[in-house]
Amino acid sequence: MGTDMIEGACDCHVHVYSPGFALAPTATFRPPPAPASAYREVQRRLGFTRVVVVQPTGYGFDNSCTLAAVAELGEGARGVAVVPPDVPDAELDRLHAGGMRGVRFMMLPGGVLPWTALEPLAERLAPRGWNVNLQLDGRGFGEYEKRLLALPCRLVIDHIGKFLGPVDTGTEAFRALCRVLDGGNAWIKLSAPYESSRSGPPAYADVEPIARELARRYPQRCLWASNWPHPNVNPVPDEQALLEWALRLMDGDATRVKRMLVDNAAQLYGFR
């Protein structure tokens, strides 16, 4: 099923790195240039018209590059910011006006927001319609399940749960993820299988069973993302191949595909 037939398809997770924007002292690596203009070619090749630019960990709390990318990519772009726990309301208003619709909690090396900031910030995001965008080692879902279910705002979980160790559909950590999704206020990206797969492309056979189960059980909760520009991944994945991998999870069901690529993202990020 070609995405050229799906108006409003959204790539829900890309990063932009542009010259002229300084990395934070907390940055764990120096990324190669990946400007918004380069992403335009990826977008054209995929046939997508919408994108969510996620603040990279390397820029810390300075969202200037991400805001500039959202502005350059235009009406079909939204962003996810990283903000300090005591961010003023006026700054959240400014970020909202610039297209931001969420706050990233990266709980792996390079992240700058602690777990203690989760609930206080979520309380402030809920009235704005923003989401918490969470990335963690999915083996910890059992530990954080109750907290995630209690969040007052929407929750978006990265990269098939990003289980950094072997899991299957019977594993308690996977069942905990499913219970979070059963709560009705969480979404998950069927993206970047290479970040947790050990068997690798093109099939990502060790990750495919859990991704397929998520696609089967939660079509109204699934999103797709390219994770462009794939920093520190070698060889660099092909975005079209990653999209086709995710489409196969939907077994040719056009309704589920449209939900994953269009409808769910429109609901979360305020696309019209």
Image: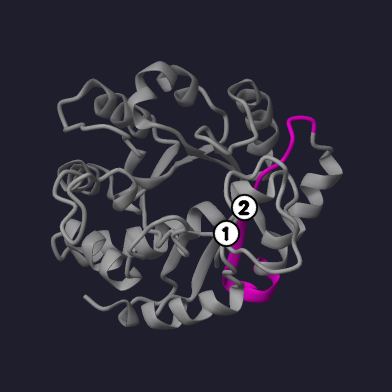
The kind of residue tagged 2 is: Gln
Q: Secondary structure at mark 1?
A: loop
The kind of residue tagged 1 is: Pro
Coordinates of residue 43 in the picture (x, y in percent): 46, 77
Coordinates of residue 132 in the picture (x, y in percent): 56, 39
Kindly identify which numbered label has been placed on residue 55. Answer: 2
Q: Which residues are magenta?
A: 70-86
- Viewer-nearest of discs 2 and 1: 1
Q: Residue at x 30, y 52 (%)?
A: 194
Q: Nearer the viewer, residue 186 or 240?
A: 240
Compared to residue 175, the image places residue 213 above or below, namely below
Q: Nearer the viewer, residue 36 or 102?
A: 36
Using the rendered view, name the quadrant where residue 88 is placed. Answer: top right
Kindly identify which numbered label has been placed on residue 76. Answer: none
Instruction: State left or right for residue 131 relative to residue 61.
Output: left
Q: Which residue is mark 1?
A: 31
In whole angstroms, how far apart are the C-alphas of marks 2 and 1?
13 Å
Instruction: State left or right for residue 58 relative to residue 165.
Output: right
